Structure formats: structure tokens, C-alpha cells
Image (cartoon, rainbow, N blue to C red):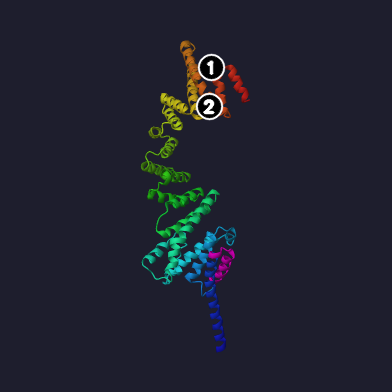
Amino acid sequence: MKKIILGLTIISTISAFAQKNKVVSAYNYNKAFTRSGNCSEVQKGLEAINASIEHDQTKNWAKTWYYRGDLYYAILASNDQACKAIDANALEKCVDSYLKTLVLNFQDPELKKLDLGKEDGSDIPKFNAARKNRSKMDDETYTSDIIGRKLPGLSGEYAKKGITEFSAKNYKGAQESFSRSMLLSSFSGKMDTMLIYNIALAAEYGENYDVAKRKYDELINSGYNVDGNGPSLYISIAKIYKKEGDEAKALTYIQKGRKAYPNDNNLLVAELDYYLQSGKHEESLNNLNLAIENDKSNAILYFARGTVHESLKQGDNAVADYKKAIEIDPTYFDANFNLGAYYFNGAAEKINEANKLDLKETKKFNALKEEAKALFTNSVPYIEAANKAKPEDVGTANMLIKVYTQTGQYDKAKETKAKYQ
């Protein structure tokens, strides 16, 4: 029996020695690839190291995972498509290998249990604290190389992957890639606000609203305004709350944005939109006055203020604003239509008033008819312009036929009617 046990011990020792040799071989294959650029060296190295990560003797060695990470890193860094074809998941396997290296490199058994790959990154501060406290490691150069040189590059690879996925409208994948990129960049101890913005944007487009709101809030609290995108953060988060049916919360964020960026027209217009939809005309008017002061050549703002003045029964002001909008943009359908309709409706009111008069009030009747005709005449050029801007709009065409008839332009009325029969 003793001879049998001895035999088993010898076999186990030989097996362990073979695994150690595979780890060393993997390192040598990577060196050979660096010299020759021959993809077969990487392939052989991966075959050796992937056997070692399964063996009890070597699977918990920091160097095993470090060498494995280096081989996958070599694939990522190579411009040879044959090398890249060795493993389509090289990025994920490379990062996984390096993160395992970082924890297995500690001599403290408790620190070896850290999971640096967790989505929330909750173990990274513990890892950084252990490094700061100079916890003993098997080889400090592994950790220094991974954090100082490898992870920044890998973070960039995930960021590029996220951009590609976002462009392909794979918003869930983009969010995950940007989040992975941010996790890797966090080892530097710095907050990459651009990555947070990309995560928020991908989450919003992917309708992962809880994440989007959380990330937008992070950016707002950090004072993010890269490329002038600070105001858009408030607008984006307000849109999300609006989609969720929380109008009050949406307005709160717009108002916060207005306080932070008082001269931003997009925030002004967003607040205006809320007031208009809520029927708060006085508040709308105040906002429009500010917006126009900041952008005097914006036809849309004059048109919007015209509609508010009209709602407040301030006809002269409404007409002045509609005319200003048309002066800026003569082809502006809405401004032309509203001004034409304003005159048209005024004329219709005069006719209704005249028709209610007693038959004896001939003089007043004729006066009202003349006033109506003058208003119809005023409406013609604006309804014509609206019809020209949107010839497919049947309602505008019908209004044009009526004003032609009311102003005695029967040939034009007939011609226009023929177009829409």
C-alpha cells in the first residue's frame, strides 16, 4: 500500500510541475510573438495558459492570470486580422484576467476574495485602500503595469465599442460598454464625466430611465458643461419625467436649469412649452420676452408670443408678432396661417354681428359688411402664403377659396377649388 501512495504522490508532483511549465511557456510564447508577430505564438500561449487556469496548482497564481491577460492584450493590440480572429471575446477575457490578477496578487487571503468586476464597483475602493496601506503583494510590478498602462487602454476599447453599439442603436449594449469603460477608468481615482454622460444618453435612448436619471443627476451635481451640454442635462431628465407622467418633477428640473443657465434659450423654450400647455399665459409671456431678448431673429419665438397675445385678447400685439415672424421667414406656414386666420375670423365675427341686426339698421349693417370685406382682404396674402407653403393642406385651401369668394375674386376661387376636387 505504501508503494501505491508513493506512486500517486510522484504522479501529482509531475502534473503540478507540468502546469508550472505551461505558465512559463505561455510567457515565452508571448515574448516570441512580440519578436516575430506570428499569430501562432499567441495561439500556443493561450492553449497553455487556459489549461493552467483550470488546474488547482496554478489557477490561484497571480502570474497565471497576468500572463493570460497579456496574451489577450496582444490580440487587441495587434493590427493583424488573423490574430484578432483567434478570439472575438479577447477584450472581455483580457479584462477579466487582469482584474483577477490584481486581487490574487495580494498575500492577504481576505483581499483575494475581492470582486473587482462587480457592476457597481463597490470593491474598488477596498482595493485602492489596500494598495494605499501597502498590503503585501507577490509582485508589485503586475499591479503597477495593469493599472498604470493596461487598464486605461482597455477602458478606451470599451468606450469605442460603446460608440459603435450606440451608432447601431444597440443602446443596452452601449450602456454596458460605457459602464465597463467607466469601471476600468475608476482605478485611476478620477471621475470621467464624459463616460457618465454617454452612459446616461445610452440609458435614456434604451428607456432604462432609472439609470439615465441617476447619471444625469450625477452630472448636474458635478457641474458638467462639456461642449456646452450643461443645459441639455436638465432638458433630458425633464423629458424622462414627462414621459413617466410626472409633469411637476419635469418642471422642477427645467426651473433648476433656468436658475443654473438663465440665458439658455432651450431651457426658456422648454419652460415656455410647459406654461403654454398648462394655459399659464402670463408666465408664458414673461418667458417669451426673455427669449426674444436673447434671440431677436428667431421667427418661432415671435410666432409663439403672437399666439399668447391672441389668447390674452391682445390683438394688436398678436398681429405685430405674427408680422415680425413673417418678416424674418416669409415662408413660415404657421405665422402666415395664424395671421390670415386672425383676419378671417375677425371678418366672420363682423358678418355674424351684421346678421343679428334689425332690418331697419341698414347703415350699420352696410358698415359691418365693409369692415368684414376689409378684414377678408387683409387675410388674402397671408392665407395665400400659407397655401403656397403647404399646398397639401386642404383646410388652408378651403379657407383660401372662401376669402376669394368674399372678396369677389371668383375666378381664383374657381381655380383653387378645381385643384382640390
Frontmost of labels 2 and 1 is: 2
- Please state the extent of the stretch shown in magenta in the rendering: 34-54
* Sequence-wise first label, 2 or 1: 2
Label 1 crowding class (10 Å Cα cut-off): few <14, some 14-19, many 20+? some
Number of numbered tags placed on the structure image: 2
The residue that disc 1 covers is 407
Q: What x and y, as percent, mark residue 381?
A: 51, 22
Is 38 covered by the magenta stretch?
Answer: yes
- Relative to residue 280, is residue 250 depicted above or below? below
At label 2, the amino acid type is Ala
Give the camera-side residue of 170 and 184: 184
Q: What x and y, as percent, mark residue 120?
A: 45, 59
Q: Can residue 1 be seen in this view?
A: no
In contact (CB < 8 Å): disc 2 and disc 1: no
Name the residue rendered at 55%, 83% in the picture. 10
Give the camera-side residue of 184 and 312: 184
Label 2, label 1: how far apart the Cα atoms are:
18 Å
Give the camera-side residue of 121 and 207: 121
- Relative to residue 16, is residue 344 depicted above or below? above
Give the camera-side residue of 72 and 4: 72
Q: What x and y, as percent, mark residue 199?
A: 47, 52
Residue 48 falls in image quadrant: bottom right
Mark 1 secondary-structure assignment: loop
Q: Residue 386 carries which label?
A: 2
Residue 102 falls in image quadrant: bottom left
Q: Is the magenta stretch mostly helix, strand or loop?
A: helix
Is 328 covered by the magenta stretch?
Answer: no
Q: Can residue 144 be seen in this view?
A: yes
- Relative to residue 415, is residue 11 depicted above or below? below
Residue 238 falls in image quadrant: top left
Label 2 crowding class (10 Å Cα cut-off): few <14, some 14-19, many 20+? many
At label 1, the amino acid type is Thr
